Image (cartoon, helix red, strand yellow):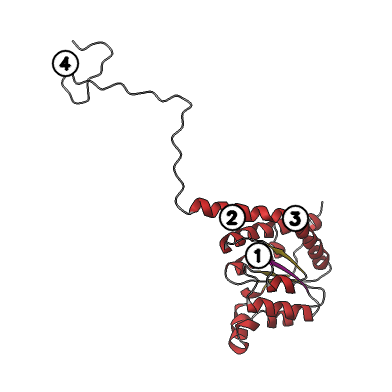
Amino acid sequence: MKPVGERTAPGAPAGTGHRVPPQPRRPAHARPAATPSPPGLAAHLDASVAAIRRLEAHLERLDRWADHLAARLTAGGRVLVAGNGGSAALAQHLTAELVGRYRDDRPAFSALALHAETSSLTAIANDYGFGSSYARQVEAHGRPGDVLVLLSTSGRSPNLLAATDAARARGLRCLAMTGSAPNPLAERSDDAVALDVASSAAIQEAQQVAVHLLCTAFDRRTVAP
């Protein structure tokens, strides 16, 4: 006879003595061991969070930018925005929020992402060189009192520097988001959010948050209560 409390192993004939050893019970509060982070991913996340935290030093600056943008755009002015590569995508994100909306309904405002003018961009680059790709558009669209916002990780792109020179010559206010300062773009702009971060990816990820912070402050001034 099989002793009470003993289980026969699956597939074993009854009474053979093959017993399943007792299994230790896991406490109800116990959790599975944490899975190690894949190599490199945790470090990337840490760098991005650290870069975003550096924006805390620029919150008042971004609030002032929003104040200036709201004053100019509600008076009929325009904001021109430009960048290269991933920074171009961030530039177009900003103009989409201004022309469309960020969170709440408000009037539409005039904002152009200069890289998105593909026919103009390629014609200018072909005829004058890529360094003039944005400056020529600033000459065409910019008016005194308008705002030029430039995004860059290095702050050294020749076409952005040329755009800044063209804007300042025509009385536009130049605002820049860059990586570590000093850099030529920050120095030539009227004001800059310069993040002392080594990783270009982390700079762009923080700049995405900066764009949303700017839009939050802008909406606070332009959305009807």
Q: CA–CA distance between discs 3 and 2?
A: 18 Å
Q: Which residue is mark 4?
A: 15
- Where is residue 78, by image quadrant? bottom right
Q: CA–CA distance between discs 1 and 2?
A: 15 Å
Q: Which residue is mark 3?
A: 59
Q: Which residues are magenta?
A: 173-181
Which of 145 and 19 lies nearest the eye of the viewer?
A: 19
Between discs 1 and 2, the one toward the N terminus? 2
- The crowd level at tag 3 (other Cα within 10 Å; few <14, some 14-19, many 20+) is some
Q: Is residue 104 visible?
A: no
**Horizontally, is 138 left or right of 37 in the view?**
right
Between discs 3 and 2, the one toward the N terminus? 2
Amino acid on which the number 2 mark rests in the picture:
Ser
Q: Are marks 1 and 2 in contact (CB under 8 Å)?
A: no
Instruction: Tell me the SS state at disc 2.
Output: helix
Amino acid on which the number 4 mark rests in the picture:
Gly
Q: Are marks 3 and 2 in contact (CB under 8 Å)?
A: no
Residue at the spot 77% in from the left edge and 60% down from the top edge:
61
Callout in the foreground (4, 3): 3
Q: Which residue is mark 2?
A: 48
Per the picture, the main secondary structure of the magenta-coloured stretch is strand
